[in-house]
Image (spheres, helix red, strand yellow):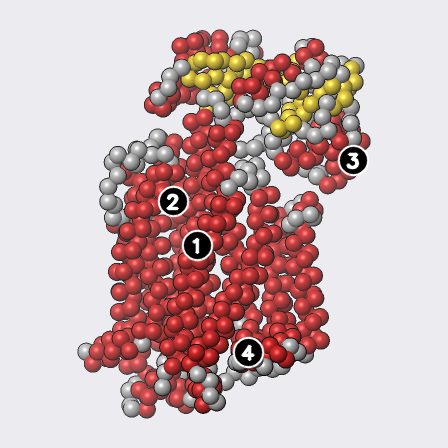
């Protein structure tokens, strides 16, 4: 009981020491609960069967990611505990001097950890439950769900999972604390505040050389993910810029610790003004002793910014793509001669899509309106390689994995103009000796543009056709949820008419306005297509409803994973900076006492402290932001098929998260550090 009372008094007396620790625990618990409670929140949502499957898959994935998150938070909490023990070494030394055994000191720490853990769990769960209701609205809005049955939800499963995971983490912290105390020596504890870290002065010439090497490595990494991205052919190649960037960042921090002091010292008016000399030396010392930490923090912030920005951008792009790329309710395409050995399919190939549906009991004239028919052709005279002409050799060298021998999709001009009008795209006008290419997948469009810019001709049925345009025209044939059209050739009708049809298709809207009515027609249509698939016919179906649900599922997965990991990474990296600064303030308290004796008032000292902490917080963030500019460009390239809309709003949203979490930790760190250096 006595040890418990001591623990309570210690907590009350050391509230300022525990502020960062407590803030981190509460945030961790709240976020962990919110993302693990999504499954329970979605119980009250009225969604379709397909959407329910997507939500189930998403919650399973989030549950798996939670294991990884728990390891990150566990490491962070142990790291924070280490700071607290270091901060209180002299206190524990006094306990030992008074005859208290290390076992009892470990019990005091046990009770303190237990009490703080219980308080943080209760407050974190309360905040988490409140935030999860907001998350419910966000989930419902994302999945376009019926909110009429919305009610307050408490997830027992998420609560139990949070209690178990954090209970294990706290148990590990207690074991860790016991081991640390058992290894401590009394003399080290009593003299903890007098120990100073030995810092070796760095040779400025070596620092300059290392700095130039670092800049070169980072610059080359930037080049590889921008202008040199075409040279990243294999999975191993993609690790090159990552390794170069990480090593370059490490060397950059290592060199700057020596250069910073020399550069500012050469600026006498700045260096000798106020307490600038003290601030510069303190910052240089901190960077010098925390190169590894700053590198990890910078890279974690870089990943956080890229993940959050890309996640929000993908969500916006998916929503915009639905409006742009799925302007009709349904599209059916029948592949012809897909299985010449199947007599039933060969027989069905002679029927139109309308006739095939009628034979199988579906009434297209009753369920469809504004029907548009079109045909897709191909010929061995027009393959990918032949369309590239003299550019083929160079393009093959840079892009060796494209299907160069594959025949290209061809649509006659009259069909395409009808489709373009229906989709709201630009119609084309061409002469009888011209051709055009439509596409919307930017990487392939850039390849197609090379021979077009040279005026590359193609030969079909003995006729030479020249390009109408010097670049691909924006357009597509098949509706989808992303920009996936890698190129369709539009040829004059009289050139195409003698070719063999590859497929036939129809575009239509449902003859009913309500969503439930459309879903009913679509369920019937899907059942028929599934029943006859590769048995009597080879019809594929694309619908706005399915595309919307698939797009929503992907964007939800990416958004929630991005939020979850992004926020956890941000908390972890920022908490490490905060704890490092608090530890430095504790170690340097005697120096601030000396400054007071030399005549510095509290205002000057507080300003010096604010600048130190500000530089240490801002420094890795600035480098992370520079990295992120290139990183986001690379993410956009990788996710190009989805689109690039909504990037500015996503960056603004990421900035808000940074300001709230990063700024919150900065303020807490400053006020706690100010209290530490004021202690007598």
Identify residue for label 2. Answer: 60
| Other residues around mark 3 within 10 Å, as few (<14) / some (14–19) / many (≥20) | few
Cα separation, mark 1 vs mark 2, equals 26 Å
- Residue 599 against residue 174 in the figure, above or below: below
Front disc: 3 or 1? 1
Work out whether mark 3 precedes mark 4 in sequence or the reverse, and give the earlier one. 4
Residue drawn at the location 55% of the way across and 57% of the way down: 625
* Residue sitting nearer the eye, 101 or 463: 463
Identify residue for label 4. Answer: 276
Q: Which mark is residue 657?
A: 1
| Rendered image quadrant of residue 189 | bottom left
Identify residue for label 3. Answer: 393
| Other residues around mark 2 within 10 Å, as few (<14) / some (14–19) / many (≥20) | some
| Rendered image quadrant of residue 342 | top right
Front disc: 1 or 2? 1
- Coordinates of residue 194 in the picture (x, y in percent): 45, 88
Cα separation, mark 3 vs mark 4, equals 62 Å
Front disc: 2 or 3? 3
* Residue sitting nearer the eye, 482 or 475: 475
Cα separation, mark 4 vs mark 1, equals 32 Å
User: Are the residues tagged 3 and 4 within 8 Å (C-beta)?
Assistant: no
Work out whether mark 4 precedes mark 1 in sequence or the reverse, and give the earlier one. 4
């Amino acid at each position: 009981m006595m040890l418990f009372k001591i623990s309570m008094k210690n907590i009350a007396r050391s509230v300022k020491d525990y502020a960062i620790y407590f803030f981190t625990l509460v945030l961790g618990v709240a976020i962990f609960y919110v993302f693990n409670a999504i499954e329970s929140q979605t119980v009250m949502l009225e969604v379709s069967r397909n959407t329910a499957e997507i939500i189930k898959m998403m919650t399973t994935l989030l549950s798996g990611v939670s294991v990884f998150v728990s390891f990150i938070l566990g490491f962070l909490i142990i790291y924070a505990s280490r700071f607290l023990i270091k901060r209180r070494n002299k206190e524990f030394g006094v306990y030992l001097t008074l005859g208290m055994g290390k076992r009892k000191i470990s019990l005091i720490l046990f009770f303190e950890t237990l009490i703080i853990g219980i308080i943080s769990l209760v407050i974190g769960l309360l905040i988490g439950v409140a935030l999860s209701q907001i998350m419910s609205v966000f989930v419902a809005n994302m999945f376009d769900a019926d909110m009429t049955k919305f009610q307050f939800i408490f997830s027992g499963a998420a609560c139990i999972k949070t209690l178990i995971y954090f209970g294990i983490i706290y148990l590990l912290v207690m074991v860790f604390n016991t081991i640390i105390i058992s290894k401590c020596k009394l003399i080290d504890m009593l003299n903890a505040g007098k120990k100073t870290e030995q810092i070796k002065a760095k040779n400025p010439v070596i620092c300059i050389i290392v700095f130039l090497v670092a800049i070169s490595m980072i610059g080359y990494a930037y080049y590889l993910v921008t202008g040199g991205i075409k040279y990243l052919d294999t999975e191993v190649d993609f690790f090159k810029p990552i390794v170069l960037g990480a090593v370059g960042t490490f060397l950059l921090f290592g060199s700057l610790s020596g250069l910073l002091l020399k550069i500012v010292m050469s600026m006498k008016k700045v260096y000798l003004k106020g307490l600038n000399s003290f601030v510069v030396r303190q910052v240089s010392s901190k960077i010098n002793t925390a190169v590894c930490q700053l590198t990890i923090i910078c890279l974690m912030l870089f990943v956080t910014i890229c993940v959050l920005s890309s996640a929000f951008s993908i969500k916006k792009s998916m929503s915009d793509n639905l409006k742009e790329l799925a302007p009709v309710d349904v599209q059916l395409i029948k592949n012809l001669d897909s299985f010449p050995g199947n007599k039933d399919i060969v027989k069905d190939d002679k029927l139109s899509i309308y006739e095939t549906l009628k034979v199988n009991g579906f009434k297209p004239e009753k369920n469809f309106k504004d029907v548009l028919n079109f045909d897709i052709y191909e010929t061995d005279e027009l393959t990918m390689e032949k369309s590239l002409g003299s550019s083929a050799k160079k393009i093959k060298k840079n892009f060796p994995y494209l299907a160069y021998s594959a025949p290209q999709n061809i649509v006659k001009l009259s069909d395409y103009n009808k489709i373009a009008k229906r989709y709201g795209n630009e119609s084309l006008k061409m002469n009888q000796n011209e051709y055009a290419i439509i596409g919307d997948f930017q990487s392939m469009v850039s390849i197609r543009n090379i021979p077009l810019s040279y005026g590359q001709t193609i030969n079909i049925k003995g006729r030479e056709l020249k390009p109408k345009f010097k670049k691909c025209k924006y357009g597509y044939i098949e509706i989808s949820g992303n920009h996936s059209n890698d190129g369709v050739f539009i040829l004059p009708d009289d050139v195409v008419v003698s070719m063999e049809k590859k497929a036939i298709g129809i575009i239509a809207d449902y003859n009913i306005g309500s969503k439930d009515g459309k879903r009913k027609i679509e369920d019937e249509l899907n059942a028929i297509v599934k029943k006859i698939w590769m048995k009597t016919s080879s019809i594929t179906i694309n619908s706005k409803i399915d595309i919307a649900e698939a797009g929503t599922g992907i964007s939800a997965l990416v958004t929630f994973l991005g939020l979850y990991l992004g926020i956890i990474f941000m908390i972890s990296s920022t908490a490490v900076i905060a704890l490092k600064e608090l530890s430095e303030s504790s170690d340097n308290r005697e120096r601030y006492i000396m400054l007071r004796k030399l005549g510095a008032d509290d205002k000057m000292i507080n300003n010096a402290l604010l600048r130190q902490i500000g530089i240490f917080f801002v420094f890795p963030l600035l480098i992370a932001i520079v990295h992120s500019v290139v990183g986001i460009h690379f993410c956009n390239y990788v996710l190009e098929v989805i689109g690039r809309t909504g990037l500015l709003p996503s960056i603004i949203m990421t900035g808000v998260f940074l300001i709230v979490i990063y700024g919150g930790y900065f303020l807490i760190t400053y006020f706690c550090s100010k209290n530490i250096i004021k202690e007598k």
